[in-house]
Every structure is written in structure tokens, then in C-alpha cells.
Amino acid sequence: MTIRDDHALAADLATEAGERLLRVREHLGYDDPGALRAEGDRSSHLYLMESLARLRPSDSVLSEEATREERLDPRRLGAERVWIVDPLDGTREFSERREGAEAGAADEGRADWAVHVALWERGRLSAGAVALPSQGRTLTTADPPKLPAYDKGRFRIAVSRTRPPEFVRKLAYLVGADLVPIGSAGAKISAVLTGEVEAYVHAGGQNEWDSAAPVAVALAAGAHASRIDGSELTYNQADPSLPDILVSLPELATSLLAGIRDLHR
């Protein structure tokens, strides 16, 4: 088993899960969003769990859709290798039509949702992939995206489209940035890596599966990724809560962390 194998597996699993989710959405449509979300979560979780059990039977798995008992399994905390997956990051966006889209259009669904597959190994994230199925791409540690150049001046911060933290509004004013609402956490972090925004700041509560895969790709690409106090993001903890995060182009990290500190004094 090589590191390359894990990179490739993460990318293959995330991409295939995403393609399956597109088929689920096409089959069920948008008339019953609750049923669409439930089936998307269920089917993608089962595919990832069955695939990892077959292909990496000695590894542990932490999934958003796991039961509480599965999440608290002490074997995970003692394992050297743990896959951290979010079978459907952005269930709300997955179940919604794109604004302005006509019913029945081939691309009527929202595109800002993702599938996350990451590998934590001996204390660090060693591989990961974020599939963006409706965008037709997968970002992976096998071939990290090249970070866009930062043209000094006003920049953009990705925030939640439904519950942006008030302090991020204040931070944007302080550092001279515009806010860009985007759906899922994976879509937001991916937007930093692809040049749609320059930073993502969140402090409204998350869990490890919300960020493990996109952070793995961000770090492989050379982006900054940390807690909002500048401390390291840690994974495979007994409590999977990881409530805040900052991902940005490396040139912006110092000013953003300084602004956050000023706002929290």
C-alpha cells in the first residue's frame, strides 16, 4: 500500500459517490427536498462505508452519517489510520434548485455541495479529495490545485449563505474584504483553492468531517489552514467537534488572524 494509492482511492471514492448523488437527484427530483436529502445521505454513506470496508478493511472510519455508538467506538481513537468522510456536504444545497433555473433543465440544481473523503494517519491528514459533482471536478491531494496569485487590494471571504457569523461581517469591514455567500464548507474551501474567493472564515460550529478532506487538499496546495486563533486543526479526536476554521491564501493569513484577534479582545 503506497501513499499514492491512498490519494487515488480518496479521489476515486469521492468522485464515484458524487456521480451516484447526481443520479439520485436526477431520479428523485426536487419536489420533496426532505426525501431527496435523506436518500442522498443514506446512499452515499452506504457506498463509502462498503467500499472502505472492502478496500481498506483494517482502517477505521469516521462518517457524518455514522451512529453515535460508531463515532464513540474506542478502536477509532487507537487506530493508526482513520478515514474521515462526509458523504454529502451541503444537503440543503443538494436538494435545492439553482436560482433562476427552469424546472426540467439539465443543470437546474445548485452546484455548491460536495463529497469529502480524507485519510488521517498517525496524527495528520495524509490524503484527501473533495468532489464537486455539479461542477464536474474533484480536488485531490494526488494533484493539488495551483493556488491563484493574490492581486493585493480588496479581497473576498466565503461565508455561509444561511447563517454568516456577525463577527465575519465586522472582520470584512476591518480588513477591507467583500463577503461571498457559498453553500457547503467543502465548496467554500474549494473556492479559495480555485480563485473564486481568497479566504474562508467560520466560527458557527462544525465537525471534523466538515473540513478534513478540503483541509487536506488546501494544505497540499500550500494554502493556510488553522483554527481562527491560529492554532492547528486536529482530527480523530474523541469529540469530533471542530467549531471554527480559517482557510486562506498564505499571503492573507497574518492580516486575517490579526483582525480576528482584534475583534475578540
Image (cartoon, rainbow, N blue to C red):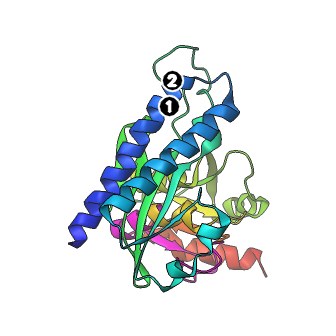
Q: Residue at x 75, y 51 (%)?
A: 163
Amino acid tagged 2: His
Amino acid tagged 1: Val
Q: Which residue is drawn at 59% across and 60% down?
A: 66
Could you tell me if the residues under marks 1 and 2 are in contact, i.e. CB atoms within 8 Å? yes
Residue 41, located in which quarter of the rendered image?
top right
Q: In this view, does 137 lie above or below 139?
A: above
**Residue 92 can be seen in this image:** yes
- Name the one closer to the observer, 37 or 168: 37
Q: Would residue 173 be found to the left or right of residue 93 on screen?
A: right
Residue 207 among those drawn in magenta:
no
Q: Which residue is drawn at 46% across and 56% down?
A: 116
Q: Which mark is residue 154?
A: none
Q: Residue 27 carries which label?
A: 2
Report how many numbered discs are placed on residues in the image. Answer: 2
Q: Which residue is drawn at 46% across and 61% down?
A: 214
Q: The residue tagged with tag 1: helix, strand or loop?
A: helix
Q: Give the range drawn in magenta.
A: 214-241
Q: Would residue 17 be found to the left or right of residue 168 on screen?
A: left
**Residue 147 can be seen in this image:** no
- Name the one closer to the observer, 27 or 235: 27
Q: Mark 1 points at which residue?
A: 24
- Name the one closer to the observer, 32 or 193: 32
Q: The residue tagged with tag 2: helix, strand or loop?
A: helix
